[in-house]
Image (tube, coloured by chain):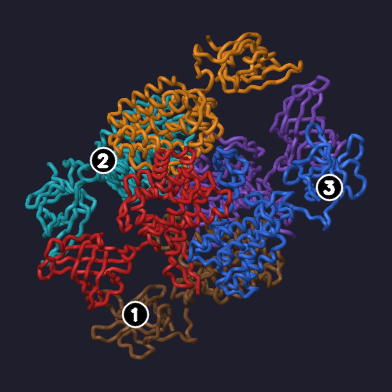
Chain colours: A blue, B brown, C purple, D cyan, E orange, F red
Amino acid sequence: MITVSIKDFVPEQHAEGYYLVKWKEVKTGSNNKPYIDYIFADVTGVINVKHWSPMAEHDYSFSAGEVVKAKLAVIEYNGAPQAKILKIQHLSDHDEVDMSQIVPSAPLPPQEMYDEIYQTAADISDPDLRKVVLTVLEQNYEKLLYWPAAKTNHHAIRSGLLYHTLRMLRSAMALCTVYETVDSNYVCAGVILHDMEKIREMNSSELGVVDEYTRDGMLLGHIIMGVKSVAKICEELSVPEEKSLLLQHLILTHHYYPEFGSPKKPMIMEGEIVHFVDRLDANLYDMDLALKNAKEGSFTAGVPTLDRRRLYKKSE
Amino acid sequence: MITVSIKDFVPEQHAEGYYLVKWKEVKTGSNNKPYIDYIFADVTGVINVKHWSPMAEHDYSFSAGEVVKAKLAVIEYNGAPQAKILKIQHLSDHDEVDMSQIVPSAPLPPQEMYDEIYQTAADISDPDLRKVVLTVLEQNYEKLLYWPAAKTNHHAIRSGLLYHTLRMLRSAMALCTVYETVDSNYVCAGVILHDMEKIREMNSSELGVVDEYTRDGMLLGHIIMGVKSVAKICEELSVPEEKSLLLQHLILTHHYYPEFGSPKKPMIMEGEIVHFVDRLDANLYDMDLALKNAKEGSFTAGVPTLDRRRLYKKSE
Amino acid sequence: MITVSIKDFVPEQHAEGYYLVKWKEVKTGSNNKPYIDYIFADVTGVINVKHWSPMAEHDYSFSAGEVVKAKLAVIEYNGAPQAKILKIQHLSDHDEVDMSQIVPSAPLPPQEMYDEIYQTAADISDPDLRKVVLTVLEQNYEKLLYWPAAKTNHHAIRSGLLYHTLRMLRSAMALCTVYETVDSNYVCAGVILHDMEKIREMNSSELGVVDEYTRDGMLLGHIIMGVKSVAKICEELSVPEEKSLLLQHLILTHHYYPEFGSPKKPMIMEGEIVHFVDRLDANLYDMDLALKNAKEGSFTAGVPTLDRRRLYKKSE
Amino acid sequence: MITVSIKDFVPEQHAEGYYLVKWKEVKTGSNNKPYIDYIFADVTGVINVKHWSPMAEHDYSFSAGEVVKAKLAVIEYNGAPQAKILKIQHLSDHDEVDMSQIVPSAPLPPQEMYDEIYQTAADISDPDLRKVVLTVLEQNYEKLLYWPAAKTNHHAIRSGLLYHTLRMLRSAMALCTVYETVDSNYVCAGVILHDMEKIREMNSSELGVVDEYTRDGMLLGHIIMGVKSVAKICEELSVPEEKSLLLQHLILTHHYYPEFGSPKKPMIMEGEIVHFVDRLDANLYDMDLALKNAKEGSFTAGVPTLDRRRLYKKSE
Amino acid sequence: MITVSIKDFVPEQHAEGYYLVKWKEVKTGSNNKPYIDYIFADVTGVINVKHWSPMAEHDYSFSAGEVVKAKLAVIEYNGAPQAKILKIQHLSDHDEVDMSQIVPSAPLPPQEMYDEIYQTAADISDPDLRKVVLTVLEQNYEKLLYWPAAKTNHHAIRSGLLYHTLRMLRSAMALCTVYETVDSNYVCAGVILHDMEKIREMNSSELGVVDEYTRDGMLLGHIIMGVKSVAKICEELSVPEEKSLLLQHLILTHHYYPEFGSPKKPMIMEGEIVHFVDRLDANLYDMDLALKNAKEGSFTAGVPTLDRRRLYKKSE
Amino acid sequence: MITVSIKDFVPEQHAEGYYLVKWKEVKTGSNNKPYIDYIFADVTGVINVKHWSPMAEHDYSFSAGEVVKAKLAVIEYNGAPQAKILKIQHLSDHDEVDMSQIVPSAPLPPQEMYDEIYQTAADISDPDLRKVVLTVLEQNYEKLLYWPAAKTNHHAIRSGLLYHTLRMLRSAMALCTVYETVDSNYVCAGVILHDMEKIREMNSSELGVVDEYTRDGMLLGHIIMGVKSVAKICEELSVPEEKSLLLQHLILTHHYYPEFGSPKKPMIMEGEIVHFVDRLDANLYDMDLALKNAKEGSFTAGVPTLDRRRLYKKSE
């Protein structure tokens, strides 16, 4: 089934596809009969949808946050598009929804990103580090596919954690070819592991939307959780102590500044690189996003995550 | 044997006792024969000691940092006291040295302090917390007896860690009687556990003198090590997750400010108390030490650990 | 007379008691006749109150901020309780209002708190300090009974200044038993005097509500005012100069950090304690308040006065 | 008597004048007889002076820090000038020493500076403020003549406080002609009073050399002492409360930043001016001093009191 | 023509004068015919103005931001004044509008301020500096007459840049008479040049209202632009290198603190003065403005540009 | 000629080669005849060298800081090597000295580094930017070959500026392949131009040793000088205004933080990259240097340029 994007809805036509239920309320019409008022959304827009005269229990079973399969009749009401439900279904195993059509998502397919990261990890020459990284990747495989990198900041999109990790990894590996005394094994491992506990620091739906931090996330934070987690896996895999310790150090120091959560700064060159590519990737992501819709030859509004800097988009 | 304190040495008399070898060098005399040049120390002072004409291998076997049993002949040389060795021995199991006579030590007997802390912990009403704290105390018993609380800062004395913990504990327990909504179990546990990993963050001799931080201490620090260690013990003792988490949180937050190593501030009242008594005890220790030798009605020099504050000693 | 709390008002019943007039406006009804629209409040809630057909001048004589004695008929209007006035009176000398039923107040009776503080002061062994502290307590007795400790921050409740002082005093006296070289006379005096000039820094009604800072409070602040005031009393009581100076120093330094109003840090141990118990009591008060209504096992919203920290309430 | 400056001493000639005894020690010569070894100083230099064969008690009665009248025989010894004492006397009432020839002093005669300040104060149109300022000037007249403005920083010279005040006053009065809504009475009073308590914050010899801060100076500081002192004088002179308060406010705020001792910033325009001319005068003094001996077209070393700035001296 | 100020409009009378079109919108009346809805403003107030039944193209040709000549009939509508247009015209060369009646403006006539500044510059004794300053003044003459000193901060009024420069110049020249080692030529030049590139950093209408920063202003800022501009003019006028360099240095350093845009602090006394009079004038302007409408004996609200300080207005 | 390195000098043998005269003094021997005392140095060490009985004027013509060609006879004196001069000559055009054998130098040949940078610049696709960068490279060619990047900090070695630029360029170009929306032309230009004015900010000998900052360097700094210089070249080469402006912006912002000399932060993504590779390269250089001589499995001392961080060298 080819989903019709909401921005392409045409009044007086039918539209079919997968949509996110953003909001739902059961109301009573002027005829004193109940109807269901929805807002449906996909990555292109939102639309008000009415389910008139719902009868069956099934009709009432759809909830906000759910992606549904629906057939709609589009009309124009008061100058704005509206739709009424012809048919609505929960997703089944047969449905193959492209989530990137539903919510803002990383620009690359999750599986592809995962594979590239995994392959880079598989090339780590140190067998201990390789084992740790591959194990962690495998253990987190399912959530990694859709987990965002943040609740509201940079990479707060579906599969954002994977995308952030991948770009950092590409950058970091490239820098390792410039700085020959750096041990690329640790850089690779550090990049892949550095934010992994975000998966347990916050709760994300499969849409990549975070509603809240977890209790552990609040009381400890992903950096400390990451140190503990890597220490444990290393112990389980009998990784020599120094290697385990350095991996923990890479995670502990990747935010660099105490006020951002790292009680220590990197004491090894590899940590310096992990931090810099982390920071750079986050900033470039935010700049890119802010500039995307800017007019050429003009300035954006101040970007909160970039110290309220206004950015300039070159003419051309 | 009653040790004669170095400050009580009288020229032309003999002295006997336990002394710390602070420094040692084999030299050649004007007669072209070797002799050993020592500096001996105890808590009251230092003295230059010569071992003339050492012959046996045993004569050369004493090293800096060692406490020895010695018999000395005191003389006056160039207006200053000096001594020559009559007899010198390594310590044996029969020797009962009062270390507080040798190096600066906490003003209370270590075993007594340990017992008071242990007893307070034994009164924790929550069985999980009690088990954790008693286990940790028992595991660290031997080192706790002499471990200092720092390399150079507050409580950098023999048994300083125990003394610091004890005074904090007394203060904290007293505060719990004022603030009724505070859970004294967590306060007690937090105080006792908060600095325990200093035992693995630095290396101390039995004299309570730290020469260097450990590799783990440098790369992670005692706060992170403490979080990991408590998490592990709680897991081994099957402590419920929330309790384990809160203990970790108390350790993680006890330095309060990120620039002092705590990435989070306390989110529970108990953590607020642990931090305040920690800070207060450290400051009062340093103030007390600086004022000890000050003249009444006058100011000390600036105290480095107290933001270079000069302190005032009341007249009376 | 037993006041019926607003939260206990039952429609179709009468209620009688003391209430705070929070807001008042004379309006014109649809019948073109005037009526008075009130909001009444006590510590349990607020209610809209109508005075229909007021006739006498007396009917118009009640103003916002005043506590009145009233008899009300409660009804339900549009699903919410409302009341109309049957009888309304200004307070007379015969009325014994328990103000803690009207506005948020310290949890202990003011007189009791005053007595405990006074008694502790009476136990100061130094006759000069004792004289100063008792004099100051006596001079401020009436206002102390209801004065709050702040306009909007910690202890901004009726009798909050007394409550803050009392808890600090209990804490500080307890700490003095742990730290033997500390002079508890100065600690006791410092705690009791430290915030006393808040009584002249801000204006409070007898309800413990501050509307504005005074001119002196704005231009100098309670710390500087406190230094001046203590200096003056000491002079009047012929207290020796050093003692006066140290009391002034305790007041001057109790905020510790220049950016919080203390140009100097404590140069005596007693000042260190005064500061720490001050800070600790304020923080614990705010934490306690924020946690009071939190759900177990969950986090509060960020608390503004605690660096926007979110707090955790333990399960149980 | 015309003093011969030390820099003008000529070997093999006699020199007579007033000199500062900077250092003194009684020694034993190779002939086993005692002699007195001095260093004499004036504003132009220092010289080693020997008193050979002192006999009388009087010969031994001169001490470091004292200004003496002496007659010397200058010689050259090992390529450097030296002198021997022919005659040495304590100062008597007949001696009229120009102290600015002995120690670094303000470039204007103290009395002249005092008179100009006094005259400006006498022109204050508000009788209350005028009375306060004139009273304070008169009370401090004697010490003002030689008091320095600091122990080591800007204007740490004889009569430095007067010089600093005078230049500030000239600047401030000039600025009042530019800013018409400013009340020049308060500006004038504020400038003259702002540092007056430095006279009680530190101890200075009549040479304008400070050896130590006073107890009050250490525990309170000249700003708080100034507030108290002005408040007291105003009370004694029955100055209306608001005027007294504003004078106190001017003193309290003149350092502007809390970390420099002012808990509040100016809330009146007059305070803004007092602060700015204070800061500016201090900085220009330090710049001028550092540049005095610099080579044209070159940079000085970093000046500690100016954030280690290096200064540039224009060519020409 | 004598303009009637908006605050003086009287219902049922006619008013004539020059007014600023603040806002304009073409609407459709209840009679289905178009009319034009305006808000007119002058320095005394604003008024809603209707142009009923506009017919000619000319009627539609007035735009927001334009000053127009208009004849109005004033009425009262719903208790507020309103006006309808009788006649409206674009400005012609014959109109002599006093802009200070239209928008907030400096209190002195622009030409007069320019002349005083120019005259002071003409008195610079160094021919190179004089040439530079006079050239810059002449080149910027037209815009200087109305340019404001800021978009929203201090001196954001018509001719504000000139007014700010003039008061700084008066202050600075006065200070030069106090500090004799200062070279008043550089001070004078520095003051006049310091903010000149604000003319190219932001865009201002002739009303002195800035809508936006320029591209160069955003990417470089007026300080860097000023350095470049002075360097260029000096090169064109063959000013010796050191003189050019020092002028650039004065501009570069006038904000003093790096976080305010000056990468270096002044290394010459002249720069110290330029900075201080700049800062002082800005602060006094903001204080004066905030105090203008304050009640005597009371405090203003916190002033954002003065660190939220509340200011006090003396009684009298 | 093959230079014998100083560390390879063998007593009783002759050595020949190019050496740096580090220090020189003419002395008088015990035979009352003059001789010349030298310290010679190369990158491997230093040695004391005597020129006995110098006769000709030529013998006296060598000065500290000069590289000479010399033939030496090595001896052992008091247990340390010493040498006497057999022959000494100024360098002539025939001498081909490998300066990297004389002083610490970048690890790559300067010409090779220059060529790689030049080639990368030649690949810039924008003809304006390419022209600017190639012109600047050509204009600075000779000095670039040996100029250091700093007086005492990172890359304070011969050809350090070139080496720093090259590594940044390699890193930056690699990052451009990861971030596709970044314009690599600006990144390349920004990297090459960013520090170019260090050549005029400080004075370096051909040995890459800086003795002092220039007057322009002190008063403006290389960032401001760079902005001015690029602006001028762009004008000369008729580069469109926006391109010139963006190049200036890249230079102005490359230190990122105001306190490090950049009054603005980057407003374009290209500036973000230039800053990050600059910072990263400097840090990695300092880390690498500090770790070079560290023992495996141990920590270095605190590195001043890295916030006194101690670094860890992995075991293996």
Residue C177 visible in this rendered orientation of the protein: no
Give the total number of marks visible in the rendering.
Answer: 3
Quarter the N terminus of chain B occupies:
bottom left
Determine contact: label 1, label 3, CB under 8 Å.
no
Identify the mark at residue A70; answer none if there is no mark. 3
Find the distance from the CA under tag 1 to the CA under tag 2. 60 Å
Depth check: give the residue in front, A214 or E21: E21
Say which amino acid is labelled 2: Ser
Position of B200 relative to A110 (above/below): below
- Residue position for label 1: B25
Q: Dot 2 lies on which element?
A: loop
Determine contact: label 1, label 2, CB under 8 Å.
no
Q: Position of residue C226 (x, y in %)?
A: 51, 43
- Residue position for label 2: D315
Say which amino acid is labelled 3: Ala
Find the distance from the CA under tag 2 to the CA under tag 3. 84 Å
Position of E157 relative to B148 (above/below): above
Q: Is residue E280 left or right of residue A36?
A: left
Dot 3 crowding, Cα within 10 Å, few <14, some 14–19, many 20+: some
Q: Position of residue A1 (x, y in %)?
A: 81, 51
Q: Position of residue E62 (x, y in %)?
A: 60, 19
Task: Examine the image and state in which quarter residue B234 appears.
Answer: bottom right
Q: Nearer the viewer, mark 2 or mark 3?
A: 3
